[in-house]
């Protein structure tokens, strides 16, 4: 195992050791990136390492790529504000949103959260309750319009080079179970659910789909998620 893989393993192990009331900070990537709201359709992206784009450049983040694609299609979408950090569970994200003291609402809000709930072995019941609360918060932040909120499913980290040393079948089953909860809650709430998990699994044995840490996905993979979301989000925006 090379040094990069060892460091990735240590980092991921540390995430599991964090208590549920704590979050892992990433000083180089602050959770909130303010923008000038006059630039166009405002966009808030909520999540964890997959939203902040751990180990990839800012331009490679999936929501940043999605906003760029929307602009290419003629929609004046501003670069997204992002509230996300590596290691965050649903509870951590809720706390992060509260601490951000958001004083505005948005035209579009995305949510991608759950991998750290799965990794830490938290229950589906707890995830359901906290995820449902995050959906409510997302709608409030979307000016009360549930049709301007969308959820991306949790990708499967088991297909990563780091995941090779774990029980990939077990990880996949658990990810599917968490995603089933998220999908069900989205359907109940009338919120768009976009399944990118099969796309994440297509990265198995393709090193280009992963970041240098051998754990998180690369900008190339995030671009595939953005392309999957593009027509559905355009429909939300009435285009």
Image (cartoon, rainbow, N blue to C red):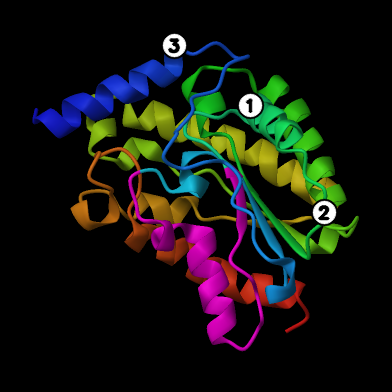
Locate the N terminus and report the quarter of the image it occupies: top left
Where residue 92 is drawn, which disc sits there?
1
First in sequence, mark 2 or 3: give its number. Answer: 3
> Residue 180 appears in which quarter of the rendering?
top right
Vertical side of 23 occupied by 181: above or below: below
What range of the chain is rendered magenta? 55-83
Q: x%, y% of residue 237?
A: 75, 75
Where residue 17 is drawn, which disc sits there?
3
SS at badge 2 = loop
For image coordinates 57% across by 55% down, the residue present is: 195
Where residue 104 is drawn, which disc sits there?
2
Residue most extreme to the bottom: 74
For image coordinates 57% across by 70% down, the residue present is: 67
> Residue 208 appears in which quarter of the rendering?
bottom left
SS at badge 1 = helix
Camera sees residue 206? no
């Amino acid at each position: 195992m090379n040094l990069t893989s060892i460091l990735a393993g240590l980092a991921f192990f540390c995430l599991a050791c964090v208590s549920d009331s704590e979050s892992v900070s990433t000083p180089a990537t602050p959770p909130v990136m303010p923008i000038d709201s006059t630039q166009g359709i405002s966009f808030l992206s909520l999540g964890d390492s997959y939203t902040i784009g751990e180990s990839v450049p800012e331009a490679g983040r999936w929501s940043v790529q999605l906003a760029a694609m929307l602009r290419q299609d003629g929609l004046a979408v501003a670069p997204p504000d992002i509230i996300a950090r590596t290691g965050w569970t649903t509870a951590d994200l809720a706390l992060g949103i509260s601490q951000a003291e958001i004083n505005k609402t948005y035209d579009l809000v995305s949510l991608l959260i759950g991998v750290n709930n799965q990794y830490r072995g938290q229950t589906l019941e707890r995830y359901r309750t906290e995820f449902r609360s995050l959906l409510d918060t997302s709608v409030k932040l979307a000016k009360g319009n549930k049709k301007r909120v969308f959820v991306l499913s949790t990708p499967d980290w088991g297909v990563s080079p780091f995941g090779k040393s774990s029980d990939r079948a077990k990880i996949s089953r658990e990810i599917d179970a968490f995603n089933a909860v998220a999908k069900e809650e989205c359907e109940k709430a009338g919120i768009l659910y976009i399944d990118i998990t099969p796309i994440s699994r297509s990265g198995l044995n393709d090193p280009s789909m992963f970041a240098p840490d051998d754990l998180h996905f690369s900008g190339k993979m995030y671009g595939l998620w953005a392309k999957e979301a593009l027509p559905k989000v355009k429909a939300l925006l009435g285009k």
